[in-house]
Structure formats: structure tokens, C-alpha cells
Image (cartoon, rainbow, N blue to C red):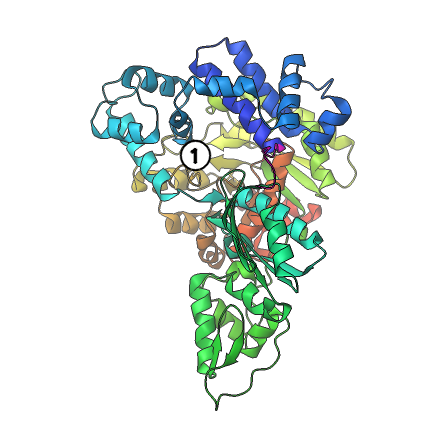
Amino acid sequence: MSGDMPVMTRERVVEILERIALLLELQGENPFKIRAYRNGARALELLEGDLATLVHDTGLNNIPGIGAALREKITTLVATGSLPYYEELRAAFPPGLFELFEVPGLGSKKIKALYEKLNVASVDDLEKACRDNRIAGLEGFGQKSQENLLRALGMLKRGAGRHLSSDAARAADILYTALRAHPDAIRVSLGGSVRRRNETSHDVDLIVSTAHPREISTAFREHPLVESVLAAGDTKSSVMLAGGIQADLRVVADAEFPFAQNYFTGGKEHNIRMRSLAQERGWTLNEYRLAPSAEDAPPVPEIAEERDLYALFGLDYIEPELREDRGEFEAAVRHSLPDLVKMENLRGTFHCHTSASDGSNTLAEMAAAAQELGLEYLGIADHSKASFQAHGLDEARLKKQVADIAALNVGFDGFRIFSGTECDILKDGALDFSDAILEGLDYVVASVHSSFSQSEKEMTRRIIRAISNPNVTMLGHMTGRLLLRREPCAVNVPAVIEAAAATGTMIELNASPQRLDLDWRWWRMAVEAGVQCVINPDAHSVEGLQNLYFGVGAARKGWLTAKDVVNCLPLKKIIPALRAKRDRK
């Protein structure tokens, strides 16, 4: 690391405040004290600007949710990189205890019971207790809980070492920006799964061309985000970043850059096809060059850019998101690659939450943030009453929100809020609100939030019954997956796609980095069936609107174009699009 003091990013400070709240909960502390730390964490997330600058300039005075004691602790964290109070709390518990908070289905109360009654202090302890059948008999758990915990532990093992696209992209952007600013850098590119916009990443890959490899590599290893150096060389370095993400740097001569950029972007199967195309022409292709493989091989033209390499093989340029060997080569030969959807194509979005349910910001604040992003419309879809854990709205509160939206819309010029709901799909496929209530809304997102363990037949029937209702505009996060935390529920995706096409129901691409659901691998089938995609951020704060970036990345991987995504329509055209299904009735 470049210094002894840990980097105190806003995200790290928020994480520490949340962990303090958890530790206090484990100690059985006053709930008001616990809530103060959680409120402080939320307040920090909503602050605009660099945290260190804010601490220096304002002392965090007059910020709702951050009192004097909390200001002092945050200032200490930012100034020194540590907090004795936090370290003392941590020392009272085994270090492996925090691993348990990553296990779906375990909250602080259950972790406290496991720790105090069964001495479970790590993920390994939890797995052993499950396999020894000790958890089934513990009050508040039972046999089914034990089985669910074993499944969750299996998923955590499979996802070990992987990170959400949002975490990887955030780290990659910081490093990319720093390398671009280095005076010795000629060209800089991201690579690997981050550049291909995969939903999870094992590490961050960067490629830099330069005439001074040692200077670039040293600067990379000494970046403040680096916690430890795993491998150090002039042309290859690997580091571990704050947050546990590995980052790898390749430094090449500028003439080698197009080949390195292509090779280190991948994916593996795509690279194999590229090498095969080179071999067919008597050449050999690797991460540094394209060269003749025999004396009688044809000469190799100059390759200045990555796209020149594709052109040399008779291919249209293949965007990084498509490089998975899933038909992109055949389409590139036929000149039929899609013109992939872009962020600037989005004209609005739906499925956004406010502080009326489990969001952090008011209706007016969400609308203002959407306008700042240049959107023409925003759909509000707070939870329905069955989602009591998310403070779901009942009929009276929903009607009031509809009235509030109408009042706000009067003051807009060229912008509109659409009134909606994220209506729970109940266990039998019925909806959480009556048709009379749903008919009074501009649109309806129908989502499953409970009973995920139903059989595939039951879940499929449940969803299809719900979307058969003419008031359901779009199906939210179809499979209910939480990446690296919860497997998709058992559902016959093709059958639901077919039903959505038959009923004229849009299918959501939920852009939350934890979901990215429906999975990009299904979207070509959905479009061919005639289903319209709607990219929704599932935003629970104004910052959550930024999730659209990850949704667009997943849509691009799914070969989607602007014409496939309904919220690429301008305001005048989205209004009849939202009514189309009801009009069919």
C-alpha cells in the first residue's frame, strides 16, 4: 500500500457505521442508539460531494440524522482512517462473526441466538451446526430454516471471490481515471468482465500502453485504493483493493495495445474463435501481436485499433458486451449485429420507490433527480400493503400519493410523474390490490416478494395468473434472484415469456446491481416472442436512479436495441404504450 492509513471512502465509512449498529444490536444495546448509527449511515449515503472535503469545510454540521457524537466519530474515521470505538466493539466478538451477516436469512437476532446458544461464530461453524442437525432444534429456527441455511451457504461458496458489477465498476472507474491522468499513459482501457458488463466480476482488468512501463506500474501499485500488492512487475501487476477486489494491470507498447485490449477483454470462448480465425489465414494471434505462423503466410496488415482486427477477419466490430461466443461472429459476418441500446436512448423509467414505503427520498426529490438526469418521465411504484416489511401502502395512502403526483405534475413543463404501484403477486397469483384500485393508476408493476420456495409449476402458474390481469403493465424482477445471495426461484421462464407476449405484458429488466433480472441470457428469446423490455432502476433513493447504467449494460449483453426497450419512447409515445394492454381488453 502507498501509505499506512486506510482509505476512508464514503462507502467504507457507511459500512463501518452499519457494522457498529449490528454490533450494538448483538450486545442488546438501546434500540435508539442502534437506530442513530443506521440513520447516520443513510444520511451519509445521501450527501453530495467528496466526504473528506465536506468534513473539512463544514464539519458535517446541520445535517439531519447526524448528531454531535456521530459527527465526531465520522471526523475521526476520515482524519485517521480508524475509530477506536469500533475496534473495541469488534474485539468483543470473534472476527468470523461478521461472515454470518452475509448469509441470506440471518439477521442480528438470529446471529445472536446462534452465537450465544450454539457458539456459532463463523460461516464454517454455521455449516457444521447445520450438518450436525443442531440448528433445527433451536427456538426460532426449525428444520426448514436449517435446510434453507445450507442452501444459502452453498450459494455463498459458489460466489466466493466474486463481486457485484457495481462494486467492480466503481473500483475500475477510479483506477481507470487515475491511469488516464498519468502523463506517461498513451492509451488506457478496461478489460475482462467489467468491460463486457457482466453481472459479477472476479477482478478488475486494466490495459495501458506506454513507453515507460515502470512508471505506470509503480503508480498503479501505489494508488490509495490499493491495500496490498500481490505481484509486482514492470509489465504485469496484481493488487488487492479496499473492499477485497483484485485488480490486474497489463502494460504494453502502444503497437501491442489493440491485441492486448482484445485478448484481455475476452470472454474465453470469444478469444478462442478469434485465434481460430487467425489460424485459418496462416497467422498466430496472442495478447501482444498478430504475426505470420509460417514463411509462406500472407503478410499481416497494420492494426492500429481493436476494430481493425475485426475488419481484417471480415467482421463488423463486435461490441465488448457481446463477446461471449453466442452468435456474435455469425451476425458480424452477415452485417446483422444489433445497434445496441445506449444510456442516452432512455427517455424515462419506472419502478421507483419513495419514502412513502422503503425509499429514502420524497416524491419531489425523486422527480427532481430524474429531471437532472435528463429524463422526461418517472414512474413511482411504492410497495403494496402485503409488503409490510417495506411499509407498503394501503388503499388510502396510495390514493393520497396519486393525488400528490397529480398536484406535482401541474407544475412541470415537459416532464411527468406516472402514478403506479409495485403490487405484490400473492401466493396464489392474485394481486394485492383490487382491480378498482389498479384501474386508477397509470401503470402497475407486479412482483413476487414472498413464498420463493414454491415448485416451478406453482410459481409459473402464479406469475402467469398475475400478468393475465389487464391492469398489470409490467412484470417485475421475474426470478427474484439476488446475485451472490439468493438463487433465482424455480420458474419456467420460456412459459412466462410466452404468456407475457400473449397478454401484452412488458417484462422488466430490473437494473439494481443485486438483481439484473430478467437475466440477459433470456432477452433474445423474449424479443423474438414479441415482448417489450422496460429497464427499471428499482431505485430506493435518488442515487438509485444511477442503477440505469447497469440495466443498460445487461440489456446490451442481451442484444437489445432502443426499439426493444419501451422506455426509450418519448413522453408523448409512452402514454399510449402504458395504456396498450388495457385497451386490448
Question: Which residue in the structure is indicated by mark 1?
Answer: 448
The one nearer the camera, 142 or 196, is 196
Q: x%, y% of residue 255? A: 62, 71
Tell me what residue is drawn at x 51 percent, y 70 percent. 331
| Figure quadrant of the N terminus | top right
Tell me what residue is drawn at x 62 percent, y 45 percent. 223
Which residues fall within the magenta stretch? 1-9
Q: Please name the predominant secondary structure of the magenta segment in the image.
A: loop
Tell me what residue is drawn at x 67 percent, y 25 percent. 403
Relative placement, left or right, of 115 versus 375 is: left
Residue 179 vertical position relative to residue 403 in the rendered view, above or below: below
Quarter of image, res 12:
top right
Res 361 visible: no
The one nearer the camera, 241 or 450, is 241
Taking the magenta stretch, the answer to whether it contains residue 8 is yes
Three-letter amino acid code at the position of disc 1:
Val
Residue 451 vertical position relative to residue 246 in the rendered view, above or below: above
Q: Residue furthest left?
A: 132
Taking the magenta stretch, the answer to whether it contains residue 280 is no
Q: Residue furthest top?
A: 30
Residue 261 vertical position relative to residue 532 in the rendered view, above or below: below
Relative placement, left or right, of 220 versus 280 is: right
Q: x%, y% of residue 35? A: 55, 15
